C-alpha cells in the first residue's frame, strides 16, 4: 500500500547515490544529525526543503514521500476485503472512520472510491441507529456526486449512477431516482449489446478465447438481470396470484436449465424468498413452505464454501477469468461471509413469516439456518 514513507526513501535514495549523511547534509544546508533523524523517522524535513531534496535525488516530491494518489486493482481488492472483514469483527464506527481516512487519501482514485461506495452501501445498516445509517447514505451520495463530476470513465460513471439511485431510494427520495434513471436509461439504450458486439469482433479476429468470455458474460448478466427483474415483478404483483404463479413457474424453469442454484445461489434465494411472501399474502402456507425450503437450500449452497466467491461452472467456464480481469473486486463477494451469514440467520424471524411460527417444517428450517457457521 502506498503509505508515506519518507524516512526509508531518503535513506534508500542516499544509498543509491552512494553518498554519506554528511554529504547530503552539506548539500541541503542542514546538520548531519538532522539527516540522521529524518532517516530514523524521528523527524521529517521542513516542507521548504522537500523541493531541494527531490531535485537532488532527481525524483518528484510525491516519489520522495512515497505517495501516489492512485491504487492498483490488486491494492483496491486487498483494501476492500480487509475492510469487509473488519466490519464483521471490529466496532462499526472504528472501521468506518478508517475507511474515511483512505477515501481522503485517495480522493482522485475513482475505481477505489467506487468500491468504497459499494462497501458502505453493503454495510451501512450495521450502524447503531437509523440516523447514523442515513448519515452514511448521504455520505455515499456525496461521494458518488464527486465521482460523477470528475471521473471520465463511463463504466465507473454508470455504476455510480446506480449506487446513487439506490441510496436515494433507501432514504425516501424516490422522485430523484425516477429523474436520474429515466435520463440514464435514455442515454444507455444498448444495454449489454456492447458485450455482444465485442464478442463478434473478437470472433471475427479469430480470438475465440476472448469471444467466449464476452458471450458467456453477456448471457450470465442477462440471466441475473432476469432473476432480479422477476423478483421485482413478484413484489409489484403480490396481490395477483395468477401473475405470481406464472412468473414463478417460468423463472424456476430457467433456473433449472441454467443450474442457478449452484452457479449463483444468492440471486435465486432472493427470488424464492419473494415467492414465499407472495404465497403467504394469499394464505397459501403449504406452497409458501415449499419456496422457503428452496430458499434455505440456496442459502446452504451459498455457504457451502469457506469464502463467498463469484464463480462459473462447466458451461460458463470463462466467467471467473472475466470477473478477475474486468471487476475491480475480482471474484470476491461484496460483503464478508460472516456479515452475510448473520443476516441470513434472521431472515425468517420477520413478518410475514411469523404466521408460520409453530409449524414443525418451518421451525426445522429456521433451526437449520441458525446452525450455519
Image (tube, grey):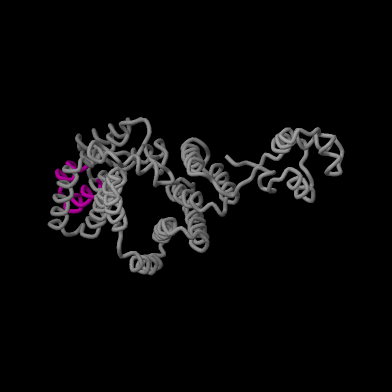
Image quadrant containing the C terminus:
top left
- Report the residue at 20% width, 59% height from top: 237
Residue 249 location in percent, x, y?
A: 13, 49
Residue 150 left/right relative to 179: right
Residue 272 location in percent, x, y?
A: 23, 46
Residue 231 location in percent, x, y?
A: 25, 53
Image quadrant containing the N terminus:
top right
The front one of 141 and 350 is 141
Image quadrant of residue 366? top left
On screen, residue 136 above or below 23: below
Looking at the image, can residue 221 be seen?
Answer: no
The front one of 369 and 229 is 229
The residue at the far front in this view is 205
Residue 93 among those drawn in magenta: no
- Secondary structure mainly formed by the magenta segment: helix
Looking at the image, can residue 338 be seen?
Answer: yes
Count of picture labels: 0
The front one of 135 and 186 is 186
Q: Which residues are magenta?
A: 273-292
Residue 246 left/right relative to 100: left
Amino acid at each position: 500500500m502506498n503509505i508515506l514513507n519518507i524516512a526509508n526513501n531518503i535513506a534508500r535514495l542516499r544509498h543509491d547515490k552512494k553518498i554519506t549523511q554528511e554529504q547530503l547534509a552539506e548539500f541541503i544546508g542542514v546538520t548531519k544529525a538532522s539527516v540522521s533523524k529524518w532517516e530514523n523517522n524521528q523527524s521529517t524535513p521542513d516542507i521548504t526543503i522537500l523541493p531541494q531534496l527531490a531535485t537532488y535525488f532527481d525524483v518528484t516530491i510525491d516519489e520522495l514521500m512515497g505517495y501516489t494518489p492512485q491504487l492498483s486493482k490488486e491494492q483496491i481488492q486487498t483494501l476492500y476485503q480487509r475492510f469487509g472483514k473488519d466490519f464483521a469483527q471490529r466496532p462499526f464506527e472504528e472501521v468506518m472512520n478508517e475507511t474515511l481516512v483512505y477515501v481522503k487519501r485517495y480522493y482522485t482514485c475513482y475505481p477505489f472510491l467506487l468500491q468504497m461506495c459499494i462497501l458502505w452501501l453493503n454495510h451501512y445498516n450495521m450502524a447503531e441507529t437509523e440516523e447514523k445509517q442515513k448519515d452514511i447514505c448521504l455520505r455515499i451520495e456525496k461521494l458518488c456526486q464527486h465521482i460523477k463530476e470528475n471521473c471520465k470513465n463511463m463504466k465507473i460513471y454508470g455504476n455510480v449512477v446506480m449506487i446513487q439511485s439506490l441510496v436515494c431510494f433507501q432514504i425516501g427520495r424516490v422522485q430523484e431516482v425516477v429523474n436520474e434513471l429515466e435520463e440514464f436509461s435514455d442515454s444507455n439504450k444498448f444495454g449489454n449489446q456492447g458485450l455482444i458486439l465485442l464478442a463478434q469482433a473478437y470472433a471475427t479476429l479469430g480470438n475465440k478465447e476472448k469471444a467466449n468470455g464476452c458471450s458467456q458474460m453477456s448471457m450470465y448478466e442477462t440471466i441475473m438481470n432476469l432473476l432480479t427483474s422477476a423478483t421485482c415483478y413478484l413484489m409489484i404483483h403480490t396481490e395477483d396470484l395468477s401473475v405470481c404463479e406464472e412468473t414463478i413457474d417460468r423463472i424456476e424453469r430457467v433456473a433449472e436449465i441454467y443450474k442457478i442454484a449452484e452457479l449463483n445461489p444468492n440471486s435465486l434465494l432472493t427470488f424464492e424468498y419473494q415467492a414465499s411472501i407472495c404465497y403467504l399474502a394469499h394464505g397459501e402456507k403449504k406452497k409458501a413452505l415449499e419456496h422457503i425450503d428452496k430458499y434455505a437450500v440456496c442459502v446452504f449452497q451459498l455457504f457451502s464454501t469457506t469464502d463467498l466467491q463469484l464463480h462459473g461452472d462447466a458451461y460458463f467456464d470463462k466467467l471467473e477469468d472475466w470477473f478477475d480481469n474486468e471487476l475491480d473486486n475480482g471474484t470476491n463477494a461484496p460483503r464478508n461471509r460472516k456479515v452475510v451469514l448473520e443476516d441470513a440467520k434472521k431472515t425468517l424471524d420477520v413478518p410475514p413469516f411469523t404466521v408460520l411460527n409453530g409449524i414443525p417444517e418451518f421451525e426445522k428450517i429456521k433451526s437449520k439456518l441458525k446452525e450455519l457457521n
